[in-house]
Image (cartoon, coloured by chain):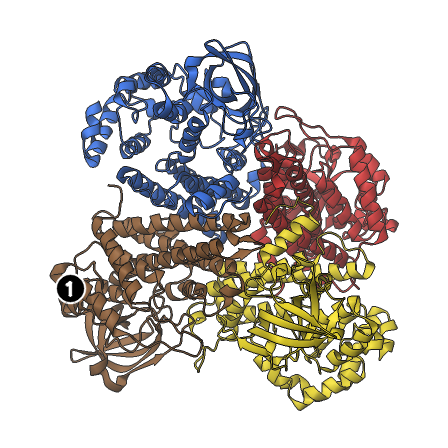
Chain colours: A red, B yellow, C brown, D blue
């Protein structure tokens, strides 16, 4: 009844911590450097079954509870990982809901084939306001035309799941880059957080395979986004805790006026409050991730998801800011790690939707 | 009824639910709004009045007979030996049924843990059953006029005189002293000792003529807090818990229990407050204002955080793995700051009517004014927020101790 | 060009501090007590020329700059005064704008006759949403019918200036209690802050003298409210500074763990921030009060007024809360003065309108 | 042009306005957006480039000739002896005309006050005119790798050798060292002395081969801050300000000037930032969102508070009555926390585009990303917010000094 990490999750957590320690996440060593796409870590994670581990083993996944997925993104957040864990899980969750038409692609995702997801026109993982793309059918074949301003993907994703207006409803379509040729243009956009891949997607009559059509599409998208938001919250939890740990480490070792900075009560109290916020976030993320897997929880999950992402954005921003401030001038340098958390946290509202908008969604979904 | 304790939790919950349906006296739920939160320093008078109702008395007798008063206590002292998750489920089920849980307040929650951890067998056998039946009702005698957060600077003296300790001094901020029969108190029994040494934890009776109680009018207009003057009040040495001069560690057990609170069930009260407020604001049409909505969404979200935090604390207690962040100070800081912020929010969202008190003699308050003013105490009593932050920083986060 | 307190204002400030020190503001010594209306302090203030001192001497006032009025309410706020300084100034500012029809009453106000003001139906000094009262003319005589839920006055005010709907526009009317007889019912309402007089006003065909009619009334009301808001901000500044001074006094003298409470950095930093807020508020109130008296400042005053009242509400609440918290359990007792500031500050949003609504007004009036 | 100084302020303002209209080279306002705020650690490169434009050079020559560079300096050193209100009015008039005020940055604002207060006549006569013409451009050499806020723990040594002091050590967080010709630096000239004793304030030349400058890449991707390594860098004793071993009080003058900042005119930059942001959000339709409006109203309100605070500071300076609350720490805390909050606000209100950087090599940022990241430094440099709060609490509010 009451949540405690399953033994599997604890195991997975340790395995992932070791993995990230052994395979440091790349980060530009200076402003002039860019990081490439590193396929080897991704393949290794796939071999471990850590890509969208919540997918049923009958469908090619690891068949672990949803909490296991939350653990993978939390571990990723702690190292400001560049790996598309959230995107892959989003793709998997969407494909699961598309039945037969998604089955083949689904097992590929679990095996580590990168599939990008493009829902809202502007906000990569925000509530869908506009799809920005129109789907047209001709003789049983579909083509897509339009643009997505921001998609959370780099060029290594060879398939995109694209939400498009298809008649009176929306539809979800798979676009294969190889097959689409010149009808698809992907333009990389440099992000504030250099570990976040972004691109602009232009579609000009791109051939597409329909995965979901009709009135049910929006419900699929809503379910997918709920799970993405809980995943996003887990990722930001990882980042928030890591930033707090960094701050604690700095104030314990850095000395001013002959004493560690952390002896100052103002520092202590600020970090105690941050700790309290992060602790509450951890409870919330664990609870929400557990509820996703429980049979009676659909209504609760629908408002827990926006709630936890709103908490996570605020906590991650707060914690990262503390890490910068309490590191002093050092915290303002590229070399110090604090700004990695800062950029990740400050990007959250842009990538997932603002905390205020999520809070409003939560309130509405609870019927107030 | 101790057979409950062996059921798996979901079955336990069902069994308890049936038991309540079967045994709660007809009409009890209508006697009083038992789920109305009585949190912190809020008005307890209507609750006290309701507890004198015959149906409540009948319910109390049935719970006592079934071992469901102080059910988390060991069976040998009249409890049911329930684990914390079962005790929490019982509270939730009473809440759901709209019937009161019969509690013994400080006796149950603060004195009993100290007795169970530090008392002799004879002390447990004598005191615990009397707390359970309601014969002994406790108030707290820790704070003194010149020692608020700094407990160890206390000045109350206990003079050992044969088989008695004779206590003199002044206690303050003693909640509900006028309703209590006993006080658990700290006094210095070794003259010349300092700080944490030489302090004894003594249970004293309040009907002694040497006890004078002076209620302190508070900003709510009520006087739950009292000054208690002790002038040569005798207590048998039998009433010293944990040994003469060794009371500090007993006090720490009590303070730990106080700070720990009821992480998993307290939220029922907060939830009720915020839900009532949402309902009122909806009725007034104020929930159409996006800025009001934002503030209520923050408050409601924080109630949920506390629910989920309580859930994790309980799981941690049950599994014996209490991560950092599940400590009592983090919990106390969370709920008391929430409560204070909720109070502040009322003044911002309730509009002009917030300032209009009910008519009547004295200083009557409506529930929202009461919540606003009473919540000012939450971040002060049971360790101020400043003290909690120090504890978190040093004991949980491991930051270096400085002077403070 | 740049503001500094005029010598007159500094003089007045000192005079008023001495006055309040010599005539302590009554406050219930316990929950059971109520305070009556004390006319002697009011008469004395009137004799000093401190009632609405900004009114031109030709009109019966003291002819001091508007800043002088701000000084009187600031001094009142510092002692949580029960005197109707704000109401009298509001009446005077309204009457000044009503020309001949207000002249007689105006000189009475300056002389200390209490005149209450009832504008919005619900919020005593808030933006007018509904007047709640209808005015009817018959054979050149006017009567008023309706109710004002809350008026900032006690029963000693024998004249009320009442805003009412009069045809297509609103009008401002004077109702004399003596002349109105049973057509006026005033019901005292007990306030959270026991020094704030409040009453409900019911009018049932009450005879009324028109002071302003037609399209110009709303502009008069807006001007009056702007000045009330600056006055309210000055009052709250007084309260905020006094609460801060109380907190400073307590933490300097109260000892815990063998040292004054104020040696704790958490206390220091919190109070340093509060001081910074109050200091900014002081600059803002002084500036706004000065601008009221300057010829080219109408547009600026119209957005300064809601700005300063929003700042003042937030600062006063913050400062009063600090005074309670840092006084420990003592701060929670009736006897200690902290709760006087707390109740005054917490009542501000109810009496003057919420800080958020004032901020929105400011933004709108600046054209954004 | 020194006749300006004797005019009453309104007339002064008019005279200055006419002078600018008459003397500003045609087209100067179009060379660069001179009113674009360059605050804290924001990108100064476009400004630096614009300063190399011939029209700027011409304007600089005219201002120099008129005594309008460093106009607040005494007339004998090339200034106009302007009072602070006149200097502020001049800045405002340049802003209104869209032309640059020619400033000498740290030389003008930080070194000059120290020289004027503690320098000899010979030092003032030598150094001040060279600062004014731009021949000497200063950077700050106070902070060291192990002494951030704790300046007195510095390790840089100055060995007195005949009529020279030879400086060795390492300085860090030195803004714009690469653009400077000189550095004002603190070093310990009395071996074995501790804390504030035995420290000297020395002006050193950066073209000495013993000076090495290493830019430190910052979170903005730029490197305004540098590490500066000093290896046996000689300076004549003439360059020691305030006397050998007595440099601490000179440093305090500099720090005071730094914290004091430009209370009354700095707001022009903040106003510009918030106005630009309001315009952008209006264009994007986001100003229809009441929650966005609330945040912008708070920001705009705070800009006004700083304007009115600056106004009162200036009036206080002019009248010699500086109330408590008009001290430099209160001002620094106000503007730096405002700036940081404005940065945080951007991430909340600008929507998805906030994360998209401009294309190009390196780590280019748009103005809002730049403001967000650069504002992180504002609460750190020139005394962290924590240091400022200590100073306010102890020096302004009179709270008892503890260890911190």
Left or right: B57, with D283 as reference point: right
Q: Position of residue C74 (x, y in %)?
A: 32, 58
Residue B230 vertical placement versus D47 (above, below): below
Q: Residue placed at 43% from the left, 48% from the top?
A: D397
Q: Nearer the viewer, residue A365 or B146?
A: B146
Q: Is residue A296 above or below residue A131?
A: below
Tell me the crowding category of disc 1: few under 14, some 14 to 19, or many 20 or more residues within 10 angstroms, Cα based: few
Residue B233 x/y as whole percent: 64, 76
Residue A254 lies left or right of residue A47; in this view the side is left
Q: Tell me which chain the residue with mark 1 is part of.
A: C
Residue at position x 44%, y 67% from top? B351
Tell me: B286 left or right of D119: right
Residue B9 figure quarter: bottom right
**Quadrant of residue C15 within the rendered picture:** bottom left
In-front residue for pair B401/B20: B401
The percent position of residue A56, horizontal first and vertical second, equals: 84, 51
Query: Residue B375, image x and y in percent?
Result: 55, 66
Q: Nearer the viewer, residue A279 or A256?
A: A256
Which residue is found at the position 67% from the left and 62% from the top? B259
Q: Residue furthest bottom?
A: B54
Res A204 seen here: no
Compared across the picture, whether D133 is left or right of A144 comes to left
Q: Which residue is mark 1?
A: C99
Q: Secondary structure at mark 1?
A: loop
């Amino acid at each position: 009844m009451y949540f405690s990490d399953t033994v599997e999750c604890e195991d997975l957590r340790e395995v992932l911590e070791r993995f990230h320690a052994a395979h440091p996440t790349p980060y530009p060593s200076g402003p002039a450097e860019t990081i490439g796409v590193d396929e080897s870590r991704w393949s290794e994670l796939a071999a471990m079954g850590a890509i969208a581990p919540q997918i049923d083993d009958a469908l090619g996944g690891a068949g672990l509870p949803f909490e296991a997925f939350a653990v993978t993104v939390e571990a990723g957040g702690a190292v400001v990982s560049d790996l598309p864990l959230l995107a892959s899980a989003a793709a998997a969750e969407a494909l699961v809901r598309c039945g037969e038409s998604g089955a083949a692609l689904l097992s590929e995702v679990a095996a580590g084939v990168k599939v990008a997801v493009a829902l809202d026109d502007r906000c990569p993982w925000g509530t869908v306001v506009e799809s920005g793309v129109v789907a047209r059918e001709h003789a049983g074949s579909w083509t897509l035309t339009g643009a997505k301003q921001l998609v959370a993907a780099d060029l290594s994703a060879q398939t995109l799941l694209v939400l498009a207006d298809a008649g009176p409803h929306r539809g979800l379509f798979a676009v294969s880059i190889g097959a689409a040729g010149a009808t698809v243009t992907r333009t990389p956009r440099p992000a504030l957080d250099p570990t976040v891949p972004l691109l602009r997607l232009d579609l000009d009559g791109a051939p597409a395979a329909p995965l979901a059509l009709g009135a049910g599409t929006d419900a699929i998208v809503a379910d997918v986004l709920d799970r993405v938001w809980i995943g996003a919250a887990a990722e930001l939890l990882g980042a928030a805790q890591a930033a707090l740990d960094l701050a604690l480490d700095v104030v314990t070792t850095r000395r001013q006026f002959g004493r560690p900075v952390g002896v100052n009560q103002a520092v202590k109290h600020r970090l105690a409050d941050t700790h309290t916020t992060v602790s509450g976030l951890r409870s919330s993320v664990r609870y929400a991730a557990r509820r996703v897997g429980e049979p009676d929880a659909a209504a609760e999950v629908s408002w827990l998801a926006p709630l936890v992402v709103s908490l996570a954005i605020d906590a991650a921003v707060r914690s990262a800011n503390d890490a910068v401030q309490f590191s002093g001038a050092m915290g303002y340098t590229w070399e110090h790690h604090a700004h990695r958390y800062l950029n990740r946290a400050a990007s959250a509202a842009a990538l997932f939707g603002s905390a205020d908008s999520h809070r409003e969604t939560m309130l509405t979904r609870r019927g107030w | 009824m101790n057979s409950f304790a062996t059921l798996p939790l979901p079955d336990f919950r069902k069994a308890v639910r049936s038991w309540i349906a079967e045994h709660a006296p007809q009409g009890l739920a209508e006697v009083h709004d038992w789920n109305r939160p009585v949190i912190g320093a809020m008005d307890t008078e209507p609750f006290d009045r309701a507890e004198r109702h015959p149906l409540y008395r009948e319910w109390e007798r049935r719970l006592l007979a079934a071992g469901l008063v102080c059910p988390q206590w060991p069976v040998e002292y009249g409890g049911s030996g329930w684990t914390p998750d079962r005790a929490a489920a019982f509270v939730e089920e009473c809440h759901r049924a709209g019937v009161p849980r019969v509690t013994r307040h400080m006796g149950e929650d603060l004195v009993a843990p100290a007795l169970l951890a530090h008392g002799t067998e004879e002390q447990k056998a004598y005191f615990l059953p009397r707390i359970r039946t309601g014969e002994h009702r406790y108030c707290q005698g820790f704070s003194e006029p010149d020692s608020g957060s700094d407990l160890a600077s206390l000045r109350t003296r206990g003079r050992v005189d044969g088989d008695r300790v004779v206590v003199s001094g002044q206690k303050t901020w003693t909640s509900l002293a006028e309703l209590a029969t006993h006080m658990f108190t700290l006094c210095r029994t070794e003259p010349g000792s300092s700080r944490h040494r030489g302090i004894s934890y003594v249970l004293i009776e309040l009907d002694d003529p040497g006890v004078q109680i002076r209620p302190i009018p508070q900003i709510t207009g009520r006087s739950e807090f009292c000054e208690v003057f002790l002038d040569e009040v005798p207590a048998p040495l039998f009433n010293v818990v944990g040994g003469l001069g060794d009371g500090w560690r007993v006090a720490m057990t009590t303070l730990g229990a106080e700070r720990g609170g009821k992480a998993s069930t307290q939220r029922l009260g907060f939830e009720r407050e915020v839900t009532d407020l949402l309902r009122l604001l909806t009725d007034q049409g104020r929930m159409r204002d996006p800025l009001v909505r934002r503030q209520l969404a923050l408050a409601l979200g924080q109630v949920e955080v506390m629910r989920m935090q309580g859930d994790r604390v309980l799981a941690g207690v049950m599994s014996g793995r209490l991560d950092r962040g599940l400590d009592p100070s983090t919990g106390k800081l969370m709920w008391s700051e929430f409560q204070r912020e909720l109070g502040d929010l009322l003044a911002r969202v309730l509009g002009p009517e917030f300032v209009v008190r009910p008519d009547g003699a004295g200083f009557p308050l409506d529930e929202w004014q009461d919540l606003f003013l009473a919540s000012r105490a939450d971040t002060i009593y049971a360790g101020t927020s400043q003290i909690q932050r120090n504890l978190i920083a040093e004991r949980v986060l491991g930051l270096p101790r400085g002077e403070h």
